Amino acid sequence: MAAKDSSNSKKETASAGASKEGGEKPAQRKRLFGTDGIRGTANQFPITPDLVLRVGQAMGHILRSHPSRNKHPKVVIGKDTRLSGYMVENALTSGLNSMGVHVELLGPLPTPGIGFITRNMRADAGIVISASHNAFMDNGIKIFGADGYKIPDTMEREIEALVCDGDLNALLANSNEIGRSKRIADAEGRYVVYAKNSFPLEYTLDGMRIVLDCGNGAAYKVAPAIFGELGAETIVLGNAPNGFNINDKSGALYPAKVSEAVGQYRADVGISLDGDADRVVMVDEKGHIVNGDHILAICALHLKSIGKLSNNTVVATQMSNFGLEKIMTKNGIKVVRTDVGDKYVVEEMRRNGYCLGGEQSGHIIFLEHSTTGDGCIAALNVLAVMKSSGIKLSKLREQMEDVPQVLINTRVRRREELDKINGFNGLLRDVETRLAGEGRVFVRFSGTEPLVRVLVEGPDRKKISKYAEELASFLERELS
């Protein structure tokens, strides 16, 4: 029987039509990199000290093999607040040093801060040790290139090949070329100034009361400083990390906590960041959730009104609500969709010169300011719209009306290209005809589980539930 889930999960995608790829084919060996770096449970594959050390060595060898503007290749490393960060940091550092790479340790800092400092300090690469919104027992590795953008898939595959098949001991640096490591004391201050520079100089946040939830994560020091130094009265939650409480019923995955506090403190706005602060979910003064789609809509409409929305286009993912597309189309703004993952959003933006993009989950990219999703900068841009327009967040939020979504996850025994399943295309076209342009369908296989995802959007929840069940039941029968 198909299992129904109408939640808006970050990890599942949806768009008009069906995925032509049919999901990822099983790899012959365990892959290291997923859609956003390497991630797993600490002390289990692939986040074990020996494998992480090899990742550092592989990366160090690649950097040493390419020309560097530095006398010795240099890598900066930052992390969030989870317990295993120390272990991963030390293993990566050892691996890089063994290949002759110098390492500069930044301590806890938001993911976008690492991207910024990588460029600012002229490093050859930057590494973020974080599992983003996951619980404390998980950890991960995200890698930025010298330009501050996440490394391409080709470099990820090169690292994988060296880690899984290479003889890294044969590539070690000579004894007199081993790299050095040092800690950078002022990384937090650098990021605070950088983030504040994204807020218009003619405005302050003086007189504004903000509830800020840092999720006991990487932004627990810098986020209160950013909003406080701009003049806001800030009520701070989730700013006492202990290694275990990152994302624990707080932050962007639990905005209800901020919603309650906004009412309690009669605040003007609530801001919830995730563990590495690359995403944000906001709350208006009435306690209503303002997710990434609403933030995109608010900022896109504002940028278009002042002539600063490049190509009158916003980039979203397959998961973004159809309501975003409707309000954008109504206002002459094109929506370009990509696969889920802010990395793919950024790639599309850079390829075609777009300035604004993001995900429903709260990864919002202002390419003028940041190379990746940045929760603090996204929130500052919404606050700037509020300041310039004099309109409360609840009214700005109402500009976009969400279209109901139904997501069904159906377990299957085998995978097959959807286009080749007899009768599926006909059923898909029939459902799309019944939606009559007022909704959309997206079907794809999970990349990690034996599941097919069926998402249907439309104005009538009862009808789209029926359509989703039809599609899911058909695929369950054909693929069992």
Image (cartoon, rainbow, N blue to C red):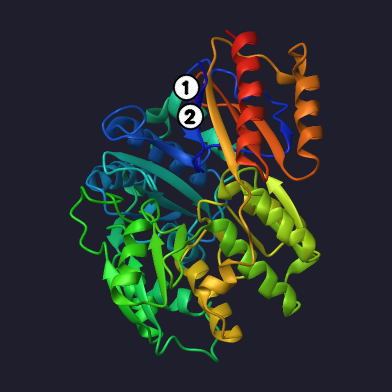
Residue ID at (67%, 67%): 300
Q: Which of 127/113 is in front?
A: 113
Q: Amino acid at mark 2?
A: Leu
Disc 2 residue crowd, few under 14, some 14–19, many 20+, Cα 10 Å? some
Between residue 202 and residue 331, name the one nearer to us.
Answer: 331
Residue 174: give x, y in percent of width and height: 36, 41
Query: Dot 1: what SS?
Result: helix
State the residue in front, 428 or 117: 428
To which residue does mark 1 refer?
A: 165
Check whether the beta carbons of the residues at disc 2 and disc 1 lie within 8 A of each other.
yes
Query: Crowdedness of circle 1 by 10 Å Cα count: few (<14), some, many (20+)?
Result: few
- Give x and y (percent) for residue 253: 39, 51
Question: Which amino acid type is shown beneath numbered disc 1?
Answer: Asp
- The reply to whether residue 104 is visible in this rendering is no
Residue at the location (63% across, 51% down)? 345
Check the image and report above or below for 265 versus 318.
below
x then y, percent, for residue 215: 31, 57
- For disc 2, the marked residue is 162
**Quarter residue 431 falls in:** top right
Residue 347 x, y percent position in the rendering: 66, 50
Q: Is residue 268 visible?
A: yes
Mark 2 residue element: helix
Q: Is residue 378 above or below residue 436?
A: below
**In the picture, residue 425 is in which quadrant?**
top right
